[in-house]
Amino acid sequence: MKLLRLVVLTGVVASWQVSPVMAESLLQSATRLTAQAARQVPPAARAGVRRSATAEQAAPAESGMSGRKKVLLVVVGLVAAGAGMYAIDRSVVDNTPSSKGTRKD
Amino acid sequence: MSNVDVRGLIRALAGLVAGILLAAGPAGAQQNGGITGVVRDDGGLALPGVTVEASSPALIEKVRTVTTDGEGRYNVIDLRPGTYVVTFSLPGFSTVRREGIELTAGFTAPLNVNLAVGAITETITVTGASPVVDTQSIRQQEVIGQQMLEALPSGNIGPQTLAYMTPGFASTQADVGGSRDTWSAQGAYTFFHGKTGTRASYDGFRSQFFIGAADGVGYVSDQGTIQELQLETSGMGAESGSGSASINAIPKTGSNLFSTTIEGYYSGPGMQSSNIDDGLRAFDITSSAEVQNVYRLGAQLGGPIIKDKVWFFAAVARWGSRVNQPGAYYNKLQGKSGIPSVPTIAYEPDLDRPAASFDWFRNHSLRTTWQATEKHKFTVFGDIQKSCRCTTGPFTGANAIESERGWDWWPSGVVQGTWQAPLTNKLLVEAGASWQVANWVNFAQDGVSRDDRSILETSTNFRYGATTVLTAPKARTGRSAQRVTASYVTGSHTFKAGVTLEQAFNDESRSRNNETDGLNYDFLNGRPLRIQYQAEPFYQQERQNAELGVFLQDSWTLNRVTLTAGVRLDYVSMGFPAAKLDAGLFVPEREVQELKGVPEWTDINPRFGVAWDLFGNGRTAVKASVGRFNQLSRSDLTRRFHPFSSSVNTAFRNWNDANGNYIPDCALANFAANGECGAISNVNFGKFIPSATLFDDSVTKDNRDFLWDINVEVEHQIRDGLSVSVGYNHNWDGSFTVTENTLLGPESFDEFCITVPNDPRLPNAGQQQCGYYDVKPALFGQGQLRVTNAKEFGNMQRYWDGAWVLINGRLPKGITVGGGVDIGRQVDDHCLTVDMPNQPNNITGSPLRGGSLAPAANSYNPFCRVVTDWMDLLDVRLRASVPLPWNFNASFIYRNTPGAPQDATLAVTSATVRFRDPARTTLTTAQTVNLYAPNSVFGDRFSQLDVAISKSFDIGFGRLRTALDAYNALNSNSVQSVISAYSTRWLRPVNFLNGRLLRLTASVNF
């Protein structure tokens, strides 16, 4: 649990350290997205596709949320995912020789 | 960094890359898309000099520009998948802007426009359906993008996902919602239309391990990094290297927008139904697979580091599964014999301890894209992973779990880099390099001591006690690849030339679980029958010093016809390094010197094709292609020549355990009959005889296996966004090899007959069936092997004829459909006599069996021509995704494919056979024989329906998507393989579809 707390704390501290730069960038992205959305192709133009739908660029929705909050959201999300993965690593049965230190190669 | 510095760095890097590539060699580039067409004025006259700009958020360089040629043609190539806007401008004419052109990998969209006289500042925006018929490419391909991968119940997404949905891929072990171990599941794409060896790539670089046949998966990709999957099944161009079909995963990149995704899925106890019915109960199968957990947690973060300059995409994931296998239990008697040298002699299921398949994966990857200057773009990708395939995978009680083994991968991973440069509007250069490595070893299952032995009960083919062999203590494999291609594009011509080069290595030791003498045992009805020897220690290294490909190809568009002609030189040289092995209990010290050029093959592979835009409207294309392809390069090409392998490494001796103590009371190192032990089955066992197997030059220099593939297809757009294709395929293999025992001939064998068991399910039930052979006793164990071309003895054949109808695209209301029907007929004919009449051995010395759709049974048979008929190979696969109100979406994948082969083999002894020569009464050893031709009888058809219901939510700061997937929604228990050994367990399912599995999926994207 100590490591988990450390990960969370590191994430929160990191978010405050990088937030001014990243917030600006995220705000620009959101603005750009809005402008692009206004130019989106009409539905009729999107009818054709070759054997599958093409991947669409994932994009944050326009929420009116401040840049700092968005950054915090990203950091919290990633830290939560990291904590989840750490928990998985701790709970999965690891009987591999590499983890046991018994490999002879 | 200044521009000058950047350019200097680029020149240095480019020089380095080019130097490496030109000094050495190749690989197959991924197939990006393109846009092509003709620009005319309102009077229909071609307009030269029109500036054509293709722009998309998918391009870090934002826009690619070309101009039309003298015939008004233009051709923009090598475009990443995405949605494009194309503008056409020429002074004196209004600018035309065409929006919403959706490109998938490998798809060239035809786009013709007319420009009207007017001011260039006047822009006419044209919208319409995106083209769906590629009227220029001769490839037959399928592509599935991220949106569909997300919408469909795709299980654990990997290179196999597209093969899973594509009619014509041979049925393999099915995955129900990720409950099959990932490594096995991701490698399920080997056979298409009877062709062996599909090339699997990640970002255009081959990702398969250089181990054995090298046709399974190698680098196990994180599904969170995959943007599209692209499958080419025929009509592949000269840029395609070895392999009969090709699957490529196209990775995600960052973009100018930050994007974060956290996603995962879960299924657990209580979310799977039992699918046991009376049919399974009749085989004493009373439990179905029970998921303990199937899980995934992934996170991806992408965005700009510097806008329009440097993008990144990072992904981390954890996933795995633990699934109790039907009818599989730990052995209650494991280690309980009381005999120190054989701790386990019998198997009794411990019903309180169900056995599970179990695996987990940890991936950590980062991709960066750097648009260094206007014309130079670099990408670098790395993924480091630790993984455990902790038990072999689905084993379904066919063997005891103690006879399975685990795989420990650490460290493993891949590093890739590419450079792309549209140096001019007409010249595009691309280069790349990849390095992949896996350090892996096998380990024994829980409860297995290193005194335990692998025991095969031959009457039922049931193995227990310990695994047959461990690839341990050392195992390491790797592959590196380089490629450089140059494309020169005019309006009418797309000329492409390139060089690809790959090197690979494989180092692996093999050892038996028992560390004392390494002997395994065969039992018959619980009593000792044979002792199985293996030469230990064993450590072998294989090297692919070079697989070089040099290709030239031109596509020439003449009015409505595009001719494609290409030629590819494929050169491969393999070998092995010097090595020394210590003496073992049964073998002397062994030493080999480094050897290169075994084999060393050079092939010229021509590829031709024509695509005809039938009506000139881009809606109907007639395509035909013919090409020659080499089979996948793989480590067993050189393994067979290595003296450590070509010596006799395994042998057996009969064991009459007269005193019933389960200990072979004889001098084990004395290979003459003594005590309870018979003579060794091969007199060369226990000797180091590099010349025990000789290889003709026809094999080492001239005999690379190849394939001819002929394809004819009509593709028609039946409505906006929807196309149908109808086609025919014929393919055949060449360059077969056989192993001859030069000390034997047909006269060295005595024919014997068996009485077919009196079972109405068997042809000739109760009757005598002859055509089986056993070597004369005086010649038993004699061997001097020679590997040569099968043509020396007769005409060996493998060919396929097949046809298909496929549909793909969109229906009204956003409904997406795909799939179709595929039907074929395969003939395997090896009716030629090398030693035993009509029953030749393949290059590894194992008996040929005919039919390539199921694992080989190591048994001889008089059935040397196997015809797998049309209806037996009928294959139907459909998929659809339907948007519903309130942001719901429903989708399904349905597969109805050929049933499992139901072969029948019989273990025979002297007491159960009758020789035609009445003077002879005994077999040299117990044999396993086929009762009828393998791959000629099939069980009930395989059927699986997977469905998914999802809903998307706008959560203010992003999008939340939740889904409930029901895999095997009809709770089918379709059988995928059966026990072929005739006994009370004959036709007992070895693998059947796991029961209905509910799985929850969620993703947050912001």
Image (tube, grey):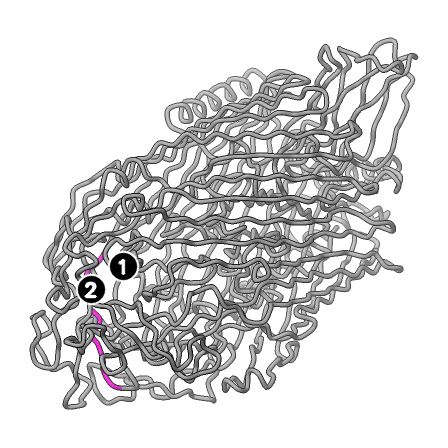
Depth check: B976 or B1004 in front?
B976
Which residue lies at the image location 53% right of the left edge and 36% below the top edge?
B380
Which of the chains bears the disc numbered 1?
B
Amino acid found under the numbered disc labelled 2: Phe
Displayed quadrant of residue B58: top right
Please give the residue where the numbered disc 2 appears in the rendered image. Answer: B749
Would residue B273 be seen by someone viewing this image from the given angle? Answer: yes
Q: Earlier in the sequence, mark 2 or mark 1?
A: 2
Binning the other alpha carbons within 10 Å of mark 2 as few (below 14), some (14 to 19) or many (20 upward) gives some
Q: Is residue B374 magenta?
A: no
Q: Is residue B453 above or below residue B406?
A: below
Amino acid found under the numbered disc labelled 1: Pro
Please tell me whether mark 2 sits on a helix, a strand or a loop.
strand
Depth check: A97 or B973 in front?
B973
Q: How many badges with numbers are in the image?
A: 2
Q: Is residue B46 above or below residue B404?
A: above
Which residue lies at the image location 71% right of the left edge and 13% below the top edge?
B69
Disc 2 and disc 1: Cα gap in Å?
8 Å
Residue segment shown in magenta: B527-538
Binning the other alpha carbons within 10 Å of mark 1 as few (below 14), some (14 to 19) or many (20 upward) gives some
Which residue lies at the image location 69% right of the left edge and 56% below the top edge?
A76
Q: In this view, does B817 lie above or below B346?
A: above
The N terminus of chain B - image quarter: top right
* Circle 2/circle 1 CB separation < 8 Å: yes
Please give the residue where the numbered disc 1 appears in the rendered image. Answer: B837
Displayed quadrant of residue B63: top right
